[in-house]
Image (cartoon, rainbow, N blue to C red):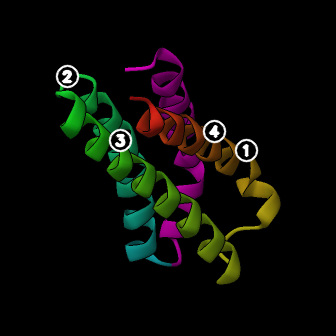
Amino acid sequence: MNFKLLTLAESAMRTLRPLVSAVEAHDRRLATQLRNAATSAGLLAAEANKLGAGHRKAQLRRAAGEANEARAALRFACAWGYLQRSQTEAADELLDQMGAILWTLTRKR
């Protein structure tokens, strides 16, 4: 797996940890979805590293989808008033960077 991608995934999870806790105080399901999506994005990307080319791209697309779901969960947590947008900016940026790398990897031949 792209080393930068793994580093971004770990950083995103560390950054998300207090946010997930804050959301969980209001909405356990949304917090669980946020945690699961962020974790799945990193795990799917790591797993893709050991797959053949065709399966790798599909797995990377799923990872990108999970990263996007985590970003959406952050937006919805803000919309519900559980978090302030300023609290989510760092995590959102890390997830966005992950998505950009994943998108690039799915376009390689």
Q: What element carries label 3?
A: helix
Q: Residue 15, can we see it?
A: no
Circles 3 and 2, Cβ within 8 Å, touching? The answer is no
Q: Mark 4 points at which residue?
A: 97
Image quadrant in which you'd find residue 90:
top right
Residue placed under numbered mark 1 in the picture: 90
Residue 53 x %, y %: 23, 29
Give the quarter of the figure containing the N terminus.
Answer: top left
Please report whichever mark, 1 or 3, sits nearer to the chain's N-terminal start: 3
| First in residue order: circle 3 vs circle 2 | 2
Residue 5 appearing in the image: yes
Residue at mark 3 to residue at mark 4: CA–CA distance? 14 Å
Q: Mainly helix, strand or loop, the magenta region?
A: helix
Mark 3 is surrounded, within 10 Å at the Cα level, by few (under 14), some (14 to 19) or many (20 or more) other residues, namely many
Amino acid residing under circle 3: Leu
- Indicate which label's residue lies in the foreground, 1 or 4: 4
Q: Which of marks 2 and 1 is nearer the N terminus?
A: 2
10 Å neighbourhood of mark 4: few (<14), some, or many (≥20)? some
Residue drawn at 37 percent across, 49 percent down: 61
